[in-house]
Amino acid sequence: MTYIKVLVLRLYDFRLMHVFFLLILFLLVVQPANADDDDIIARIRAGDAASGKKVYQRCIACHTIDKRGEHRVGPNLYGIIGRRAGGDPTYGNYSEAMQNSEIILDYKNLDLYLENSKLLIPKNRMAHGRMANPQERADIIQFLRVYHDNPPPLKTD
């Protein structure tokens, strides 16, 4: 009987270790690339607004960019940098997830949102949802800076 208890305890310990290992692996693989703020800012600084304009062509079916431009399926993106996600009071079609989000679309969060919008704000309705290429994200963020009255400075704190 003692042998069975020891065997059960060892199997239990093995299962806990296995679950712990899988959890660590999951956290390392599934989470977006967590570049630190300095790396993100440096990448955005190196971005090119002209190239970002080309990347933005993927967005025009759902978003406008001009100041006081109309909304489409998604909100107008003029001045999006620094705004709360789901925070344009003139757009009335935000998902509940966006409305309840407290996320500020600073450079880091905007980069993460473009990389995988569903990971940053689960259950949002953005159809595109993923921009895996970091250079394209830097380029489009530089493009979005052009369409902003007073874009936040690209500095690290």
Image (cartoon, rainbow, N blue to C red):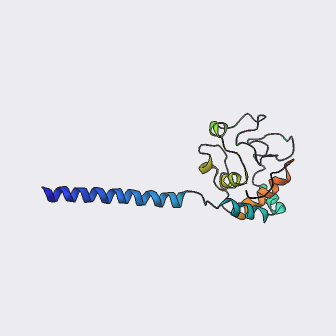
Residue 80 versus residue 45 in the image, above or below: above
Total number of numbered discs in the rendering? 0
- Where, quadrant-wise, is the C terminus in this rendering? bottom right
Q: Quadrant of residue 103?
A: top right
Residue in front for this viewpoint, 37 or 146:
37
**Image coords of residue 9 (percent x, y):** 24, 56
Q: Which residue is drawn at 20% across and 58% down?
A: 6
- Where, quadrant-wise, is the N terminus in this rendering? bottom left
Q: Residue at x 84, y 62 (%)?
A: 50
Q: Quadrant of residue 52?
A: bottom right
**Image coords of residue 100 (percent x, y):** 64, 37
**Image coords of residue 36 (percent x, y):** 65, 61
**Image coords of residue 44 (percent x, y):** 76, 61
Residue 23 versus residue 90 in the image, above or below: below
Q: Residue at x 33, y 57 (%)?
A: 15
Q: Is residue 96 left or right of residue 45?
A: left
Residue in front for this viewpoint, 44 or 156:
156
Q: Which residue is drawn at 36% across and 59% down?
A: 17
Query: Extreme left residue here?
Result: 1
Residue 91 versus residue 45 in the image, above or below: above
